[in-house]
Amino acid sequence: QVQLVESGGGLVQAGGSLRLSCVLSGRTFSNYAMGWFRQPPGKERGLVAAISWSGDSTRYADSVKGRFTISRDNAKTTVYLQMNSLKPEDTAVYYCVAGPNWFNFGSWGQGTQVTVSS
């Protein structure tokens, strides 16, 4: 059973940066594509970024391209989301996800709150 634990959320001013981390346990990390979803207040969840099992391929939502970077460290079984130039509209609960590929994320973390003040 895959377990995902996120950390790194918090309150930041617009223009600031945060780095989210997510540790996977229970299964072999390098077998999984990883990603981050977010759910803003009153809105649906949407994909923010995803990375292949090898780390060679990434994809991003248009709204975060050039500002956010997803990466992974297979030795530490950890995926990261570096968020720069944060905007108030980035305020959301961020969820770490894992799956056999980035079209099929079946495992979810509990979520971490990111709040960007104007």
Image: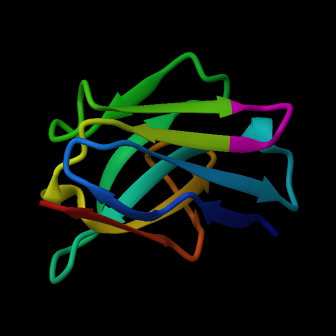
Quarter the C terminus occupies: bottom left
| Residue lying farthest to the top in this orientation | 56
Q: Residue at x 44, y 26 (%)?
A: 58
Residue 75 in picture, x, y percent from top left? 86, 31
- In this rendering, the answer to whether 4 lies above or below 15 is below
Q: Residue at x 33, y 58 (%)?
A: 12
Find out whether residue 25 is within the magenta segment. Answer: no
Q: Quadrant of residue 5?
A: bottom right
Q: Residue at x 56, y 30 (%)?
A: 71
Quarter the N terminus occupies: bottom right
Main SS category, magenta section: loop
Q: How is the image coloured?
A: rainbow
- In this rendering, the answer to whether 105 lies above or below 75 is below
Q: Residue at x 77, y 35 (%)?
A: 30
2 vs 115, left or right, is: right
- In this rendering, the answer to whether 26 lies above or below 51 is below
108 vs 117, left or right, is: right
Find out whether residue 76 is within the magenta segment. Answer: yes
Image: magenta residue range: 73-78
Answer whether residue 101 is visible to the viewer in this image: no
Viewer-nearest residue: 59 or 118: 118
Residue 109 in picture, x, y percent from top left? 59, 69
Viewer-nearest residue: 18 or 79: 18
Residue 4 in picture, x, y percent from top left? 69, 64
Q: How many marks?
A: 0
30 vs 107, left or right, is: right
Q: Quadrant of residue 41?
A: bottom left
